[in-house]
Image (cartoon, helix red, strand yellow):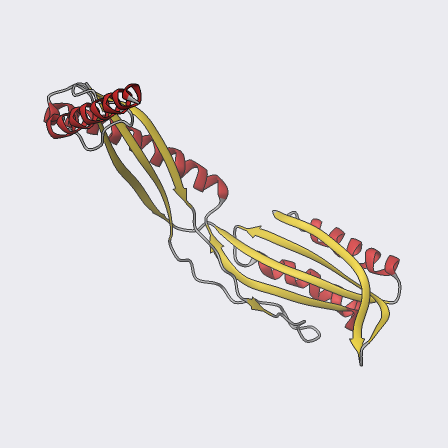
Amino acid sequence: MKKLLLINSFALIVSFCFALSASYCASHCEEVSIVPKTCDCNQTTVTITLEEKRELIPDTLLLKFRVSVTTTKETEALNLMGKLDEALRKLNLEYKGGKYSVRENCWWEKGERKCVGYKGSITYSFLLKNYSEQNEVFKVIDKFKRERGEKVKLEVNEPEWIVSEKRIKETERELTALIFERAKNFSKTASKALDKVCDVEAISYGKEYPIYYPNQVYAFGAAEGEAIKAPQPEKEEKSVSVRAKVRLRCK
């Protein structure tokens, strides 16, 4: 029993001394935050968040659309979408997508599942340099619709001017370099203020990209012989920013 009391008393003394030491260190060290599990009064950890932001004028018109077909046979749906894809490729415009799907045309009626023919759809995201290029895309689709009649439907997502991925990446590199230079300058300022030698220990970067939320609208075929001239969306500046948490260790 005495041995147990002695052990408990020793544990209390050690805990008290540790708390006292930590309290002393916290009250005497010039620091923004103390490195966990350490109590080195000659060492100071300083953290700061830096951000660089730049407004960019969009250079690419994003045109998203989906073409749907309704046919009696599955192979017919595939062939129709294949011909449309071939015609759009001949425009030699930059695009992503071309993903397609084919399924039975089914619905529920009075609790009974009915199926007639097949439905197919194919989606694209064209990246255009000039707004007038969208008219070339719509001409191809309009011609395709005239030849196939009611079998073809077009659904267009609201076109919007965006910043190209290439420009975003270039801007990110420039902003990252600016933050690194600011971090080095801040380390000099901190060294002078604390009368210590401060070095950049770690930089954690975070990036913010422009976000696009297109609304769904519908485009219909032009009348026979009528020229297609789609509206021109306005260009609005988009912001790209790089934020970094910088940690300095000063001794």
Q: Is residue 218 above or below residue 98?
A: below
Question: In percent of the image, x 52 and y 58: which residue is there?
Answer: 131
Q: State left or right for residue 212 relative to residue 26.
A: right
Q: State whether residue 93 appears in this view.
A: no
Q: Nearer the viewer, residue 162 or 196?
A: 196
Which of the image's four quarters has the N terminus? top left
Q: Nearer the viewer, residue 14 or 10?
A: 10
**Quick one: which residue is furthest to the front in this view?**
1
Q: Report which quarter residue 31 is drawn in.
A: top left
Q: Position of residue 25 (x, y in %)?
A: 15, 25
Q: Is residue 173 above or below residue 97?
A: above
Q: Report which quarter residue 105 is drawn in.
A: bottom right
Q: Position of residue 244 (x, y in %)?
A: 33, 36
Which of the image's four quarters has the C terminus? top left
Q: Total marks drawn?
A: 0
Question: In percent of the image, x 47 and y 52: which residue is there?
Answer: 162
Q: Position of residue 241 (x, y in %)?
A: 36, 44
Q: State left or right for residue 84 relative to residue 53.
A: right
Q: Nearer the viewer, residue 121 or 247?
A: 247
Q: Is residue 166 above or below residue 195?
A: below
Q: Report which quarter residue 179 is drawn in.
A: top left
Q: State left or right for residue 217 relative to residue 193.
A: right
Q: Position of residue 72 (x, y in %)?
A: 88, 67
Q: Is residue 175 above or below residue 211?
A: above
Q: State whether residue 105 appears in this view.
A: yes
